Image (cartoon, rainbow, N blue to C red):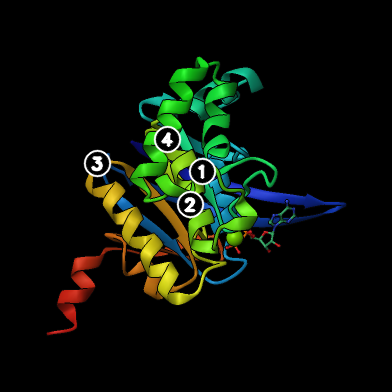
Amino acid sequence: MIQIKDLHKSYKMGSNSLHVLKGINFNVEEGELVSIMGSSGSGKSTLLNILGMLDEADEGSYTLDGVPIKNLNERVAAKYRNKFLGFIFQSFNLINYKSALDNVALPLYYQKMPRKERMDRAFHYLEKVGLAEWSHHLPSELSGGQKQRVAIARALASDPKVLLADEPTGALDSKTSHEVMELIQGINDEGKTILIVTHEPDIAQMTKRIVNLKDGIIIDDHKVEQIRASQYV
Ligand code: ADP
Ligand code: MG
């Protein structure tokens, strides 16, 4: 689903340049649930933004579901983003004056889906995340966990190939974080490919594979079963 080779990224600041990604290589197969772990500033969001086509690498290659992602004009990039990718953010990024249902339906409106179809679909996904009774509530009337569920429904509504989540539990308490991760695990069980950025080891342990980033390189990449198993050796 995802192939990246020798990815480099620097941020230019005046005459200085900060080399953030220093040759990243990894592949993600369809149906994987992967966490990208690392301390603050290690380049996790930079990597996720490139994978999400929100930013471009300076060097290296990125292939998404067989499509090389390079030098696309914004119209084509937007088309691929809509078709391939769903985003989940730490701060939920919901629209405050729209109901839960309208928040989920909004991306479908931009994709020009007819009203009846997009409302049915939005409701279906709200139901899936356990919020059918909350569909007409505003974000301000929902708890943090519920807001993130709305955001997850919104990300799923376009049926993207890949879900990308940047610190999806970063604004939630530990119990709610685990509930949101259980929801994400359930979505992965249905076959969705999911990448999660986190700096919390507990959260990473709830995925199937952990890619460890340090100072812009991958220092470790392992299946989660393997560490669980090794605890008994
Ligand atoms: P993480 O998500 O792991 O905390 P980031 O990818 O956000 O790390 O950032 C990696 C480094 O790049 C940090 O030192 C950060 O300050 C810097 N950085 C991130 N975004 C920008 C930007 N748009 N311009 C300049 N520097 C940036
Ligand atoms: Mg970050």
The N terminus: image quadrant? top left
Q: Is residue 20 above or below residue 127?
A: below
**SS of the residue under disc 1:** strand
For disc 2, the marked residue is 165
**SS of the residue under disc 4:** helix
- Residue type pointed to by label 3: Gly
Dot label at residue 123: 4
For disc 1, the marked residue is 87
Direction from residue 41 to residue 133 in the image, left or right: left
Q: Does mark 4's beta carbon lie closer than 8 Å to ligand 2? A: no
Front residue of 164/92: it is: 92
| Farthest right residue in view | 14
- Residue type pointed to by label 1: Phe
Residue at (54, 58) in percent of width and height: 44
Direction from residue 36 to residue 32 in the image, left or right: left
Report the Cα–Cα distance between label 3 and label 1: 17 Å
Disc 2: CA contacts within 10 A as few (<14), some (14-19) or many (>=20): many
Report the Cα–Cα distance between label 2 and label 4: 22 Å
